[in-house]
Image (tube, grey):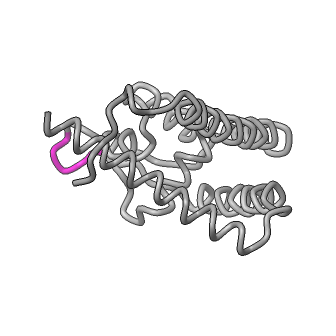
Amino acid sequence: MPVMANQSEISDDDARADLRLWLRLLTCSTVVEKRLRRRFIEQFGSTLPRFDVLAALDRASNGLSMGELSRALLVSNGNVTSLVRQLEQQGLVVSRPASDRRSSIVSMTDEGSERFAELASAHGEWIRGMFSHISADEERQLFDLLGVLRRSIAAEDREEGAE
């Protein structure tokens, strides 16, 4: 296990660099998310959270329980329930009782699959547009570096759990 520097051994410049990096990541993420939210509303009269529900269901051919959907989207059961109800009213998803009858399984309708394909196509174009000024090599480097960051975050979680 690598030896972590004592907090007093970390220079102010290093600490500021970490914070600047975090703020840069947050800013980029926030701008992308805001653009996606605005475009879904303007062009499709839909929302990013509804798209996220459809995307999760698209990856699950047998549907998902409300709890699985909540965990996949990292949101509360209440939020998922509201989104699923909205999508049901639009005819894009259906809920059926699960085998234990205490929960329900949500899956996309044929209309939902068609709608998701339309939304996903536009989503992909929007992302490609926002990333269009990054070369393929830079994109690979950024992807790899973000993988390093993800592993660093996971390692810190493991260290906290060992305490």
Quadrant of the drawing holding the N terminus = bottom left
Tell me if residue 17 comes above or below residue 106 in the rendering: above
Quadrant of the drawing holding the C terminus = top left
Tell me if residue 88 comes above or below residue 127 in the rendering: above
Q: Nearer the viewer, residue 98 or 138?
A: 138
Q: Give the image location of residue 82, x and y in percent.
A: 49, 28
In screen coordinates, is 101 left or right of 76? left
Tell me if residue 38 comes above or below residue 53 in the rendering: above
Residue at x 22% of width, y 41% of height = 159
Q: Give the image location of residue 53, x and y in percent.
A: 52, 46
Classified by dominant secondary structure, the portion drawn in magenta counts as loop
What residue span does the magenta drawing correspond to? 97-101
Q: Give the image location of residue 78, x and y in percent.
A: 41, 25
Residue at x 39% of width, y 32% of height = 9
Q: Nearer the viewer, residue 91 or 41?
A: 41
Total marks shown come to 0
In screen coordinates, is 154 left or right of 85? left
Residue at x 49% of width, y 38% of height = 84
Q: Give the image location of residue 2, x and y in percent.
A: 27, 52
